[in-house]
């Protein structure tokens, strides 16, 4: 009896894995049964059985693709993920950007809205979170689609066991796990809540300049604040209970010396007597026209670069990706960091500016997609049972 139970568990695990592998391929583009069998090294019969089940559950659909080569038969049946198979919600709460997006399981964007809450220091309140949740719920009802996962990108550190904030200036006015709980209760689905730089790194790895090429990478966010994280083969090195990403503050929300020197807001404060206006756009403009401002900003780039050198030498990183509002300083800024790393890093180092503007949203999409594709058979069965 025990042996049969163990065998059933193993077969279920293998089946889920095979389903995910097939859906991962179909997420990229449509494939035929024969092509999927060749790519997955499964038998055509095994692939066909999975495809039939996925069709019966409304997860994928057949499409006819016309092929020019007559030798392959003209019309050929392929399979793709169905647009109405389900939905993922991604919300980015990074600093002054509060953006909510709904995707279908094929990665198509169904809805996007940017929210502007005009509070000093980019804080957010319970009523603001409720507004976003209510509008998303209304939109989901209009779309008449099941939500299988919500991904939340948040500044600060989250306890991965309790889903409560450890430190976060933006969420200081929210209690415990309120943000996680309201999304979980409203949409009755899996909620993934992670530090924003972690989400950005995952987005850049899967959709941007990293593009899954590198073994060990470091992602730096240099903007209004500072943050960093590292990935090994696409997986975030998150540490005990998910802590990683913070280099600009600490447990007591005290700003670090690095942040005092290199964050945009601190640079702006130091140089305000040399600016016509005390705002970031004026700082960016003055960098191009004012020699003193230019030299001071370049010095901050060297300070940041020296910290990155320590990070890369510690873990032997292959590549560094730099994102954030500091990239608005242009080539002089990024090249200063690149030259410093080339000179002082032990391994040969590649340095790229981030490619994606919405890397956090893309990171949330990727984490949600992975979860849903791994659990899709159980998720569909539960929704159909409860419908």
Image (cartoon, rainbow, N blue to C red):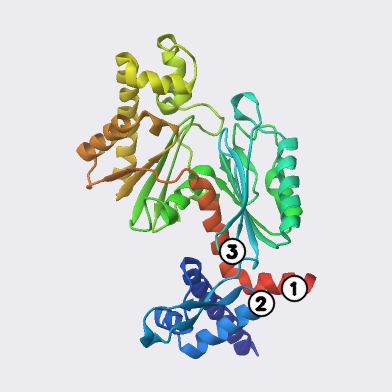
Tell me the residue at 25%/46% (across/down).
349
Residue 288 location (% of width, % of height) = 33, 21
Quadrant of the image containing the C terminus: bottom right
Q: In front of the other: label 3 or label 1? A: 3
Q: Quadrant of residue 383?
A: bottom right
Q: Is residue 68 above or below residue 260?
A: below
How packed mark 2 is, by other alpha carbons closer than 10 Å (few <14, some 14-19, many 20 or more), is some
Q: Secondary structure at mark 1?
A: helix
Q: Secondary structure at mark 2?
A: loop
Q: Are marks 2 and 1 in contact (CB under 8 Å)?
A: yes
Judging by the rendered image, the residue that carries numbered circle 1 is 384
Q: Is residue 346 above or below residue 189?
A: above
How packed mark 1 is, by other alpha carbons closer than 10 Å (few <14, some 14-19, many 20 or more), is few
Q: Secondary structure at mark 3?
A: loop
Tell me the residue at 37%/52% (across/down).
210
Q: Quadrant of residue 352?
A: top left
Count of residue discs: 3
Tell me the residue at 70%/63% (across/down).
146
How packed mark 3 is, by other alpha carbons closer than 10 Å (few <14, some 14-19, many 20 or more), is many
Marks 2/3: CA distance?
14 Å
Quadrant of the image containing the N terminus: bottom right
Marks 3/1: CA distance?
17 Å
Marks 2/1: CA distance?
9 Å
For marks 3 and 1, the one nearer the N-term is: 3
Q: Are marks 3 and 1 in contact (CB under 8 Å)?
A: no
Judging by the rendered image, the residue that carries numbered circle 3 is 105
Judging by the rendered image, the residue that carries numbered circle 2 is 57
- Closest to the observer, 47 or 77: 77
For marks 2 and 1, the one nearer the N-term is: 2
């Amino acid at each position: 009896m025990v042996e049969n139970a163990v065998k059933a568990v193993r077969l279920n695990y293998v089946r889920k894995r095979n389903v995910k592998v097939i859906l991962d391929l179909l997420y990229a583009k449509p494939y035929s049964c024969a092509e999927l069998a060749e790519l997955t090294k499964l038998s055509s019969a095994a692939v066909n059985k999975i495809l039939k089940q996925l069709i019966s559950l409304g997860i994928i659909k057949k499409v006819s693709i016309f092929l020019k080569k007559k030798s392959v038969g003209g019309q050929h049946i392929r399979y793709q993920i169905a647009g109405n198979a389900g939905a993922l919600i991604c919300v980015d709460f990074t600093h002054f950007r509060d953006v909510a997006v709904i995707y279908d399981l094929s990665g198509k964007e169904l809805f996007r809205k940017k929210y502007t809450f005009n509070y000093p220091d980019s804080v957010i309140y319970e009523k603001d979170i409720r507004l976003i949740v209510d509008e998303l719920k209304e939109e989901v009802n209009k779309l008449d689609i099941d939500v299988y996962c919500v991904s939340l990108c948040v500044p600060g550190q989250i306890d991965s066991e309790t889903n409560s904030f450890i430190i976060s200036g933006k969420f200081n006015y929210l209690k415990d796990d309120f943000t996680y709980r309201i999304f979980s209760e409203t949409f009755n689905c899996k909620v993934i809540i992670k530090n924003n730089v972690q989400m950005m790194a995952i987005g850049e790895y899967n959709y941007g300049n990293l593009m899954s090429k590198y073994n060990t990478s470091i992602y730096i966010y240099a903007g209004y604040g500072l943050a960093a994280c590292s990935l090994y083969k696409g997986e975030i090195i998150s540490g005990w209970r998910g802590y990683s990403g913070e280099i600009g503050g600490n447990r007591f929300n005290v700003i670090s010396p690095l942040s005092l020197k290199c964050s945009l807001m601190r640079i702006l404060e130091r140089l305000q007597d040399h600016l016509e206006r005390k705002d970031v756009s004026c700082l960016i403009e003055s960098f191009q026209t004012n020699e003193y401002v230019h030299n001071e900003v370049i010095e901050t780039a060297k300070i940041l670069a020296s910290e990155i050198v320590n990070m890369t030498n510690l873990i032997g990183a292959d590549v560094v990706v730099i994102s954030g509002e500091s990239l608005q300083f242009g080539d002089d800024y990024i090249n200063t960091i690149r030259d410093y790393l080339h000179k002082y890093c032990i391994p040969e180092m590649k340095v790229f500016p981030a490619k994606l503007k919405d890397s956090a949203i893309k990171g949330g999409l990727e984490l949600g997609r992975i979860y849903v594709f791994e659990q899709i058979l159980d998720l569909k069965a539960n929704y159909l049972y409860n419908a």
